Image (cartoon, rainbow, N blue to C red):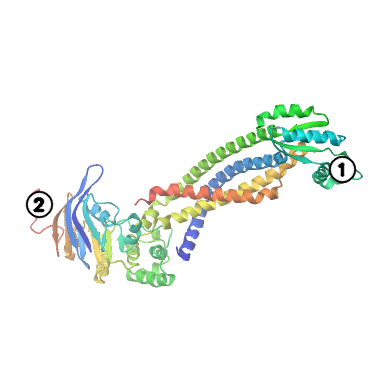
Amino acid sequence: MVEFKTVVKKYSNGTVALNNVSFNIKKGDFTFLVGPSGSGKSTILKLILKEEEPTEGSVFVNGYDLSVLKRKEIPCFRRSLGVVFQDFRLLPNKTVYENVEFAMQITEALPKEIRRQVPMALALVGLSRKANAYPNQLSGGEQQRVAIARALVNNPSLIIADEPTGNLDPETSWEIMKLIQEVNMRGTTVIVATHEKSIVDKMQKHVIAIERGEIIRDQEKGQYENEVKDSKICC
Amino acid sequence: MKLRTAKFVVKEGFVNTYRNVLMSLASMGIVAASLVILGFFWIITVNIKYNTQFLKDQPEMQIFCNPEMDGHQLGMLEWTIGRDKRIKEYEKVDKKQAFEKAKEMLGDDKDVLEGLDESFMPVSFIIKLNNSADYGEVVEKYKNYPGVDSVRYSKKAIDYINRILRGLQIGSSLLIAILVVIAVFIIANTIKLTVFARRKEISIMKYIGATDWFIRLPFIVEGIIIGLIGAFVSFLALFIIYKLGGGWVQNDFIMVKLVGMKDVAFQLIMVSCLLGSLVGASGSIISIRKYLRV
């Protein structure tokens, strides 16, 4: 589903964001991308979204080889993914319904399809009753649900969440993570970048840990920190 | 593109124009002002052309004989002209033709010729020279020819007017080009404000897989709306200016005949609409370019 092969990313100012990173995320996986700020998490997500180009190595997402993807083909590629951000990124002058609808309008979907899919996505995140509210009338958790509904509405095979709980209190964070897990249960591959230790530890999913641009751990059913605490030994 | 997408795009464009109505109005004003100046020059050019048309229609050289000239003298003159090496070709206009032409030129006033016949009209020769530099000698020679009344040479005047016209055209084209560039920049700036206010929205659209054109088109529609309304306002302004100013010009300069507004209106509105929408669209494209690179 998502594969990095010896990826190196150097920014123009000389920073090496990723150094020889390789990993593989299988279809249907729920993967946590963990690591402190500046470790390279965001760079990995940017590479997956083809917002940035790798300096070396190659990235495969959803069967697309991103190194040969033309600029013209990027929109089409991005429609096969759903993205959720820390700051929600909803359109402020559109209602909840319109925000979700918009993601479908972009794909030139049939109106009939839109009328069926949008309420379904809203029902899935439990916001059917707030369809006509504007984003600023919602709580943070509710806004994030809208964002998840928007990411889901086109039935993407991969959902990428960049710190989806970063702006939320612990309780709401849990609800959102449960929701994302539910989406994963329905067969969608999920990648979540986070540094919420408690969540990662409790959910026991595939964990890829990054530090200073290198993968220090890649394990199934992992935790935020290695039980052996080898990172402590380095210090 | 599908019809409903087109509908969506056009609707978004209108909504955006309305949303920052003040800036839109400012841009429309700038477009209108530029197009008024532009149209003004264009109308002047058209009118000068129209007023100098009669000169162009005239033969470059014409030798008029005395109406009382006898056949022998006429034969001599024609023979001389025919043998003159400086003359490329000539055409004889006899009394009857001259009379017909006079009637034609007088148009509605041809009653003044009533009771007269062609006998008072002069015979004339329309002459084309091989080399226009020879005109001085030729004029000199035939002016003093027995039986010749006058020699008219209008090539010089035509050249002069052509030079003025060309200068005016180059000048106004240059001015138009500058004005268009200024208008494009101002519209680009206006739309840049909209784009800047909506840059977050644009990046969201990019993330969920909107194509560049899907994002760009509503802004282009916005630019075109601004351009078209500006064009329409400028047309109205020019119409009023022409109506008022035209009357004044015609009162003071009787010899100047103005082109009717009806004759230029269609062209004027087409040109302003085309330029207006072009300026608006290119302004949008320029200002949005930067934000599409996500």
Q: Position of residue A169 (x, y in %)?
A: 27, 59
State whether residue A23 is above or below residue B95: below
Residue A195 falls left or right of residue B164: left
Q: How packed is label 1: few (under 14 Cα within 10 Å), some, or many (20 or more)?
A: some
Q: Quadrant of residue A109?
A: bottom left
Residue furthest right as drawn: B115
Q: Residue placed at 47% from the left, 44% from the top?
A: B189
Task: Verify CB contact (< 8 Å) between mark 1 and mark 2.
Answer: no
Along the line of sight, which residue is nearer the eye, A146 or A14?
A14
Disc 1 marks a residue whose amino acid type is Glu
Q: Secondary structure at mark 1?
A: helix
Q: Position of residue B178 (x, y in %)?
A: 53, 39
| Separation of residues labelled 1 and 2 (CA atoms) | 122 Å
Whether residue A23 is visible, yes or no, is yes
Whether residue B66 is visible, yes or no, is no
Tell me the residue that label 1 is attached to.
Answer: B118
Q: Residue placed at 70% from the left, 41% from the top?
A: B53
Q: Residue placed at 54% from the left, 53% from the top?
A: B225
Residue A203 falls left or right of residue B110: left
Indicate the chain on which mark 2 is placed: A
Q: Are marks 1 and 2 on the same chain?
A: no
Disc 2 marks a residue whose amino acid type is Lys
Q: How packed is label 2: few (under 14 Cα within 10 Å), some, or many (20 or more)?
A: few
Q: Secondary structure at mark 2?
A: helix
Residue A232, label in figure: 2
Looking at the rendered image, the quarter that the N terminus of chain B falls into is: bottom left
Q: Position of residue A88 (x, y in %)?
A: 33, 58
Indicate the chain on which mark 1 is placed: B
State whether residue A73 is above or below residue A12: below
Residue A65 falls left or right of residue B62: left
Residue A50, label in figure: none
